[in-house]
Each structure stands twice: as structure tokens, then as C-alpha cells.
Image (cartoon, rainbow, N blue to C red):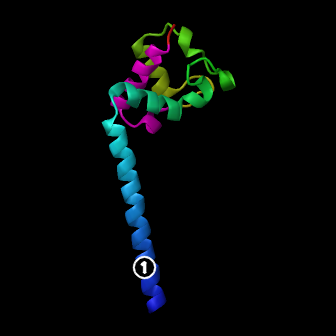
Amino acid sequence: MVLKNSIILSCLVWLTVSCQESAQQQDHFTKQTPAEQGASLYSMHCGQCHGEDGQLGASGAKNLSTSQLSDAQIVQIIKNGKGAMPAMKALLETDENINLVVSHLKGLRR
């Protein structure tokens, strides 16, 4: 019985700590400016292929610093993907997050 109670207590502590860490991460994100939020989202979901400056081009990714696409075209590609790029709508979760990334992308242009 003592072992069972110890296991239950350990699980409750782990769940509490996990929930607190998740809340802290979300709180940090919401305290960022929109520009910082866009940069964070871009870094998490786009930077690996496009590079932090938009010029990496890994796996056939386009150089975003020279892009002439309209906002609507960028949103369409982010939501639905293109070529080797997968759709990012589910990862970015909201239109607000997608628009934050679009704003960041436009800032990468030369």
C-alpha cells in the first residue's frame, strides 16, 4: 500500500511540474512582442530549412530574403505547403500565429 501511494504521489508531482513548465513557456511567449513571437515561431518551425536569415535553402527551401510573394501567397504556402515543404497550418495552430510568421518573413527581405 505504501508503494502504491508513493507511486501515485510521484505521478502527481510529475504532472504538477509538467503543467507548471508548460504554463511558464506559454506565459513567456505571450509576454513577447508580436515581432518576437513571429521570430520565435519562425525559428521553431521554419529556420531549420530556410535558415534564421531566410537564406539557408536546405532540402530545396526557397531563399526568403529575395521573395516577392504577396502576403496572401505566403499565407497560402504556409497553410498548404509547397514542393517539399509540408503544410504548417496545424503546427502554427492559429491564423494569428501564421500572420506573425508572415510579418517576420517580410522583415527578412533585402
**Highlighted magenta segment, given as a residue range:** 88-108
Q: Where is 11 relative to 3, above or below? A: above
Along the line of sight, which residue is nearer the eye, 73 or 42? 42
Task: Reply yes or no: does residue 16 show up in magenta.
Answer: no
- Residue at the right extreme, as displayed: 59
Q: Where is 6 relative to 20, above or below? A: below
Q: Where is 56 relative to 97, above or below? A: above
Q: Position of residue 28 (x, y in %)?
A: 36, 42
Asked if residue 87 shows in the view, the reply is no
Res. 66 image quadrant: top right
For image coordinates 60% across by 31% down, the residue present is: 48
Res. 94 image quadrant: top left
Task: Reply yes or no: does residue 102 show up in magenta.
Answer: yes
Number of numbered callouts drawn? 1
- Residue at the bottom extreme, as displayed: 1
Along the line of sight, which residue is nearer the eye, 101 or 60? 101
Q: Quadrant of the N terminus?
A: bottom left
Q: Mark 1 highlights which residue?
A: 8
Q: Position of residue 10 (x, y in %)?
A: 45, 75
Question: Could you classify mark 1 by the number of other residues whose Cα lies within 10 Å: few (under 14), some (14-19), or many (20 or more)?
Answer: few
Q: Position of residue 42 (x, y in %)?
A: 48, 29
Identify the main secondary structure in magenta: helix
Q: Amino acid at mark 1?
A: Ile
For image coordinates 44% across by 14% down, the residue present is: 106
Horizontal side of 56 relative to 12 (left or right) equals right
For label 1, the SS is helix
For image coordinates 58% across by 27% down, the residue present is: 85
Q: Position of residue 40 (x, y in %)?
A: 45, 32
For image coordinates 55% across by 15% down, the residue present is: 64
Asked if residue 7 shows in the view, the reply is yes
Along the line of sight, which residue is nearer the eye, 30 or 105? 30
